[in-house]
Amino acid sequence: MEVLNFLANGFSMALTLQNLLWCLVGVTLGTAVGVLPGIGPAVTVALLLPVTTKIDPSGALIMFAGIYYGAMYGGSTTSILLNTPGESATIITAMEGNQMAKRGRAGAALSTSAIGSFVAGTLTVVALTFVSPLVVDVALQFGPPEFFALMVLAFITVSAVLGASALRGLTALFIGLAIGLVGIDIQSGAARFAFGIPQLLDGIEVVTVAVGLFAVGETLWVASKERHIKEKILKMTDSIWMKAEDWKRSWKPWLRGTALGFPFGAIPAGGAEIPTFLSYALEKKLTKHPEEFGKGAIEGVAGPEAANNAASTGTMTTLLALGLPTSATAAILLAAFQQYGLQPGPLLFVNSADLVWTLIASMYIGNVMLLVLNLPLVGVWVKLLKIPKHLLYAGILIFATLGVYGMRQSAFDIFLLYAVGVLGFLMRRYDFPTAPVLIGMILGPLAEAQLRRSLSISQGDWMIFLQKPLSATLLAITVLIVVGPWLVRKLKKTEAKTKH
Amino acid sequence: MPTLVSAGLILLGLILLKEALFGGFRGVDETEAIENPTDWPAFAWITAGIIANGILMVPVGFVISGTLLFVLAARGFGSKTWVKNAIIGLIIAAITYAFFNYGLGLGLPRGILPV
């Protein structure tokens, strides 16, 4: 099989000392930021963008990927020991995991979560290995109209499907699109949304928006809203090695969680939260020990943990094979690729096969490294949690201003950073999702390019999107997703009315 | 494209306005502001830190303005141990400066440092 040849080639390059080091740095950094509240993989990759411009792309991308899935491992440690999730994908882990810790079973919880993450991570990278060439084959037949329709579908599902309000999600998306438009249009040379301010003519940097929304916004929020929350770090009193009973109860949830997480991560519906909730509900239904749920049932940790790691690989699959980011971090990873002049998607597999397969091979290696880092070395990460809030967030801000200034040597960007930070604060207060902003900002210009190309192919005829069967189908699915729930509700209401 | 986006923003803004005026945003916890009031002084300290950093970064240099940011932000989290924070901040800023400026060539402003 050709795929195995590619993979073997990838391994030969991923196993070089240099790439191994990049991988190690990435997964270690990822675990650290996953453990620490207030900073996550999205911000970390964004902050590293200015610094990695001169570095070999495959090494840098290996590191970034490592940060991404590493954070999924690290976040569980915080959820279990502190009851505050390190990452939003690990919220569910906190439910049962923290209960287990309170009952002296922190070691078992940490263990099942690390091993489950490893099982999920490795199995899904295998899936990625075999699924992506298939997806690429289909996607190579996509033309600009199909890509545009796909991106529209992604925009809509990411903003309007999840979360409390489609309205707020769409607003976030459009804000992101607007931010992405700021600057000079490549094709016509016209200045857009620059308001006569010279620094805006170069556009707004991804780093500024990502760090502003996440790091600065988070800092403002925690300082003004959550300062008085005192968290107790639970101690690990039992062994990190699980008993036979724990293994028996964990292995099926691991597999079920993996199966749930991978497809959900791959579709643009908002990342790892859904599959982890679903996994939890599923495990609760299927368990032979229902009375334990809410008090520390190990299945409630095993399943969701596998799910969140599986979801992150699913996201990587869609990002690599289609060039479609399905989460905020994926959007920033896309920006990272663009920094090196690379465009993820089917053509990447064709033109830069070496790079892609080295990256995929490194993911296998990274998961192994993470198993070691998170199991025996978990005590190290627990020490990180003891850093007092004021030092942690002040330090994060130093790095934030460093990264943002360093991008364009411009102090103006720091003020921009603050403005975005306030926006992030308001969005948090009024429950506006932040991922659509980043996706809109990074995918928007790409979507526009495809739109223009499509229109130039059809010579200005907008009907081209409906004439091409695939793009028409994608657009129809989009409409269905938007209109469907509303229609169902309307139908239910009329049904209820006719019953009376 | 800008026309599309602008039109979208205006439309969404109007709908949001309508929602806000007639019963608030759907599904947002309105009592949260009363139960968990925003600590505006904390907000202000962090704001001061970032803005000061922005103003002073180029004239005074990354190390000093970074230290100032650290101290003000720490104060935003309630820490009044000025000297200790200043020292920690200085160490972090200095190491970061050395690493990123000389190690990775990022080009951070030297300001008034004699280095």
Image: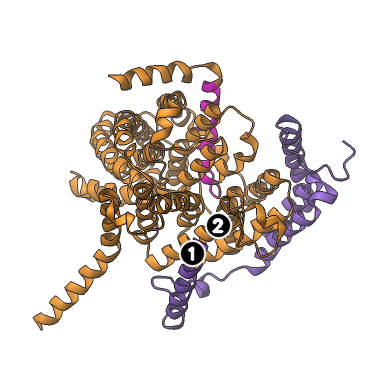
Residue A483 drawn at (x, y percent):
27, 66
Quadrant of the image containing the C terminus of chain A: bottom left
**Does A440 appear in magenta?**
no
Query: Are callouts 2 and 1 both on one chain?
Result: no
Q: Which chain is orange?
A: A
Looking at the image, can residue A35 be seen?
Answer: no
**Residue A181, label in figure:** 2
In-front residue for pair B11/B115 = B11
Residue B5, labelled with which disc? 1
Residue type at tag 1: Val
Check the residue under mark 2 and report the chain it is in. Answer: A
Q: Chain of mark 1?
A: B
Q: Look at the image and name its color scheme.
A: by chain
- Picture coordinates of residue B55, whole percent (x, y): 79, 57
The chain coloured purple is B
Q: Quadrant of residue A467?
A: bottom left
Q: Is residue A379 visible?
A: yes
Residue B4 vs residue A11, the one in the foreground:
B4
Q: Main secondary structure of the magenta part?
A: helix
With respect to residue A389, does B13 lie above or below? Answer: below
Q: Circles 2 and 1: CB distance less than 8 Å?
A: yes
Above-or-below relation of A343 to A442 = above
Query: Secondary structure beneath disc 1?
Result: helix
Residue depicted at 43% across the width and 70% down the height: B28
- The answer to which of A208 and B50 lies nearer the viewer is A208
User: In x, y percent, where is residue A152?
Assistant: 38, 55
**Residue A34 included in the magenta stretch of the image:** yes
What are the residue bounds of the magenta stretch? Answer: A19-42
